[in-house]
Image: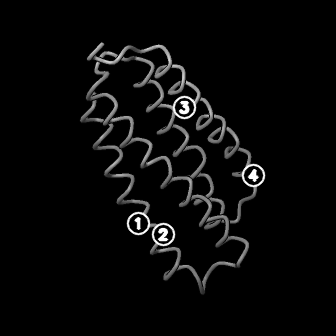
Amino acid sequence: MSKTFLLLGAVNTFLCIALGAFGAHGLKNILSSEMLTIFHTGVQYHFYHALGLLFIGLLLVNFAKSRLIELSGWFMLLGIILFSVSLYLLSLTEIRALGMITPFGGVSFLIAWAILAIALWKEKSPDQ
């Protein structure tokens, strides 16, 4: 499972860089400043959690049997989809109703980090 999260992290980090460049160069003259800020927020949280996916992958190298660490990674991915993708779509379409999805992504991020904290508290490292 470590490789899965490392791959997800790498792909999402690539997407963050591409979307960030697209926002900075391709959208700056198309979107209003408010919508550009919303798009940027999506990229920002996407990037934090893409790195989080890489972190999960690295943790799973040492804690391969930890279902809680895996679960944390899946909640991070869900958060990216619900939070960042909803902000991308909101900023590009200006359909404000999409903003109702975003908080579910934020809650997914919070759950992911809480589960990770619990997992790290409970798990014994392989050298113990």
Q: Is residue 70 above or below residue 101?
A: above
The local crowd at label 4, few if under 14, some if 14 to 19, many if 20 or more residues have their Cα within 10 Å, is few
Residue 35 appears left or right of 45: right
Q: Amino acid at mark 1?
A: Ile
Q: Earlier in the sequence, mark 2 or mark 3?
A: 2
Residue at the spot of label 1: 17
In the picture, the quarter occupied by the C terminus is top left
The residue under label 2 is 20
Q: Separation of disc 1 and disc 4 at Cα?
A: 27 Å
Three-letter residue code for mark 2? Gly
Of the 4 image quadrants, the one containing the N terminus is: top left
Q: CA distance from mark 3 to mark 4?
A: 25 Å
| Mark 2 touches mark 3? (CB < 8 Å) | no
52 horizontally vs 2: left or right? right
Residue corresponding to mark 3: 112
Q: Marks 2 and 4, how far apart in space?
A: 23 Å
Q: What element does badge 1 sit on?
A: helix
